[in-house]
Image (cartoon, helix red, strand yellow):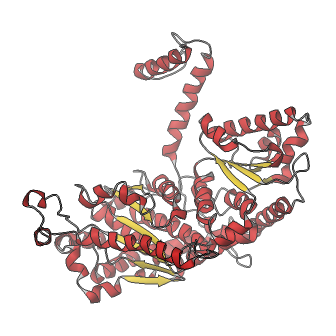
């Protein structure tokens, strides 16, 4: 019997038959299922685990040489086997004095060459040394990008914009995002902006991402049209004063009108959804908050990068524990969803970021070694959703408490509120924060313990209502609690925690978390549809589908679309 079979058997014969209410009554067990590192506490006592299972987790990790693999990945091996690439987003936050070798070359000097350029440029913009075309200070930044070129940046921006230091450093500045190709998103991104005070950052590694390039063209036209109204028509200098890019395609960025000195590169060993600590994220975030402030995010992420490979005891390694528990819930307990609930309004975009990192990384059935992992891959990569507490309690918690399926939860909280520093009445802020966190702690126990029929009867509930007020409980969750308020350092830690848990799960499932072939098919088909629409711009009936290989149902739908457009 291998260790995965042993874990499955232990769950089936022992843990699945033991209610969390019983497990939580064991004080000795509870104290062993909590660990701390660098200002972060992880409590997993409300999961269906015990010390025996954690010992089995340790054996699983040792037998699969997980720590050796994790160390090899950070050292530069080409772990992304389908694309023959290294996986080194960790190098983006590695100290300058260290070395990481890829194809015989230390890549750290290249990383810092880009970071130094980002620092110099962003400081020149923030200080007013680099100005717009009409010599006005550039106070607004619009980030044009989608997926990994957007979600991680927005998560960090939202997490820090109400931090007391973040507010001071971003005073008078705006950061906006344009991701969706929907023209309404363009209107919202550009609304009430003064073109003379606005800088655009176009995030596209190859400078070919369809949505991003279309949005970039719309914004370029907007810049030129706005300046034409002001009486200026020097297109080259106007564009060079208001466009920057993070890309590796200098030929295309040059054709687009972007000065080469304002194009910041990165490398094929940085996947898009792991790129926020590259210039993709550091450039726009530094424009908003200042480079030195955002560098603290890199330091926090590096703290977890090191912890991942240096702490070999499973019960103390936060990202490895998260990954093991995620694997266990999906593959052993067969749970198909995960609710991510930050009890912190500043993390309102964190679930969206994790959705992409997790489901685009591990949402696949293509195994690297099918024969080796197939048995425990049948239930993998849960669907992830989430909203901040307490809002989520008034949204989907009814299903989580009394629904027919168990949905594990991960709760994230902070011991202190961002709002306390600088508040005119700190005691009132603490009182409000305590109210928030009271819900954090209460939901954890409500999910685990539930409410029995005996308890309902003891409360004097009428017989006809009793079965409505019974809660089954036995619903697992884990809790992450930060010692301080959300700040750049621990936001970087949180980013890296969830990046690495995805990697750990991917290794255990035997998949490659760093390709995304499933995303490509829809892109190709969209191009085919687009060619039909372009060919039939003024034709609202009986469209020409020559060369378009699609079923009649899709062709009928496209015909209806064009016909609707032709009706007034």
Q: Residue furthest top?
A: 542
Asked if residue 505 is positioned above or below residue 568 in the image, the reply reads below
Position in image of residue 158 (x %, y %): 59, 60
Q: Measuring 28% from the left and 70% from the top, which residue is drawn there?
A: 446
Q: Is residue 7 left or right of residue 263?
A: left
* Towards the viewer: 428 or 178: 428
Q: Which quarter of the rendered picture does the N terminus lie within? A: bottom left
State the residue in front, 270 or 426: 426
Q: Is residue 312 visible?
A: no
Identify whether 248 is placed above or below 290: above
Q: Residue at x 21, y 76 (%)?
A: 21
Return the residue nearer the eye: 52 or 405. Answer: 405
Q: Which residue is found at the position 55% from the left and 64% from the top?
A: 346
Q: Quadrant of the C terminus?
A: top right
Is 79 positioned to the left or the right of 510 in the image?
right
Above or below for 306 versus 539: below
What x and y, as percent, mark residue 303? 59, 78
Residue 121 visible, this orientation: yes
In the displayed structure, 177 sits above or below 164; it is: above
Q: Position of residue 82 (x, y in %)?
A: 53, 53
Residue 394 falls in which quadrant of the image? bottom left
- Quadrant in the rendering for residue 387: bottom left
Pick out the residue farthest to the bottom: 28
Residue at horizontal 72 percent and vertical 60 percent from the top: 288
Q: Position of residue 404 (x, y in %)?
A: 22, 55
Tell which of 195 and 267 is nearer to you.
195
């Amino acid at each position: 019997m291998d260790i995965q079979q042993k874990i499955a058997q232990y769950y089936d014969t022992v843990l699945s038959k033991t209610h969390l209410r019983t497990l939580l009554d064991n004080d000795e067990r509870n104290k062993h299922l909590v660990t701390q590192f660098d200002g972060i506490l992880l409590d997993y006592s409300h999961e269906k685990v015990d010390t025996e299972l954690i010992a089995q987790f340790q054996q699983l990790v040792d037998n699969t040489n997980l720590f050796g693999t994790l160390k090899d990945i950070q050292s530069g091996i080409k772990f992304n086997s389908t694309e023959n690439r290294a996986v080194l987003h960790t190098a983006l936050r590695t100290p300058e004095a260290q070395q990481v070798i890829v194809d015989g070359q230390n890549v750290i000097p290249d990383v810092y060459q880009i970071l130094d350029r980002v620092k110099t440029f962003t400081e020149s913009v923030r200080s007013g040394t680099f100005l717009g075309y009409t010599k006005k200070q550039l106070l607004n930044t619009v980030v044009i990008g989608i997926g990994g070129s957007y979600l991680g940046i927005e998560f960090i921006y939202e997490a820090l914009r109400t931090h007391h230091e973040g507010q001071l450093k971003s005073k008078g500045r705006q950061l906006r995002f344009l991701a969706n190709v929907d023209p309404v998103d363009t209107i919202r991104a550009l609304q009430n902006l003064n073109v003379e005070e606005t800088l655009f950052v176009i995030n596209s590694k190859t400078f070919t991402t369809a949505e991003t390039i279309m949005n970039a063209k719309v914004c370029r036209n907007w810049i030129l049209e706005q300046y034409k109204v002001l009486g200026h028509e020097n297109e080259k200098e106007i564009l060079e004063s208001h466009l920057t890019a993070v890309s590796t395609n200098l030929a295309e960025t040059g054709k687009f009108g972007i000065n080469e000195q304002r194009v910041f590169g990165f490398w094929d060993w940085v996947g898009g959804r792991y790129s926020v600590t590259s210039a993709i994220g550091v450039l726009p975030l530094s424009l908003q908050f200042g480079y030195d402030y955002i560098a603290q995010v890199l330091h926090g992420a590096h703290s977890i990068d090191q912890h991942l490979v240096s702490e070999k005891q499973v019960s103390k390694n936060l990202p490895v524990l998260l990954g093991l528990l995620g694997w266990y819930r999906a593959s052993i307990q067969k749970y198909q969803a995960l609710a991510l609930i930050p009890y912190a309004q500043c993390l309102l975009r964190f679930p969206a970021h994790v959705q992409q990192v997790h489901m685009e990384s591990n949402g696949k059935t293509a195994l690297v070694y099918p024969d080796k992992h197939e048995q425990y891959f049948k239930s993998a990569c849960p669907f992830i959703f989430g909203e901040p507490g307490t809002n989520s309690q008034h949204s989907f918690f009814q299903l989580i408490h009394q629904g027919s399926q168990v949905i594990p939860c991960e709760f994230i909280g902070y011991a202190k509120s961002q709002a306390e520093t600088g508040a005119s009445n700190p005691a009132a802020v603490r009182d409000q924060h305590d109210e928030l966190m009271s819900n954090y702690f209460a939901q954890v126990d409500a999910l685990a313990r539930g409410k029995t029929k005996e308890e309902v009867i003891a409360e004097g509930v009428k017989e006809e209502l009793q079965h409505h007020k019974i809660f089954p409980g036995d619903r697992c969750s884990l809790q992450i609690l930060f010692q301080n308020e959300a700040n750049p350092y621990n936001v970087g830690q949180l980013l890296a925690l969830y990046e690495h848990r995805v990697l750990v799960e991917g290794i255990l499932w035997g998949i490659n978390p760093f390709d995304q072939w499933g995303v490509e098919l829809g892109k190709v088909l969209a191009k085919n549809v687009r060619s039909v629409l372009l060919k039939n711009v003024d034709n609202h009936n009986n469209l020409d589908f020559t060369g378009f290989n699609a079923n009649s149902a899709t062709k009928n739908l496209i015909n209806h679309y064009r016909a609707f457009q032709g009706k007034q």
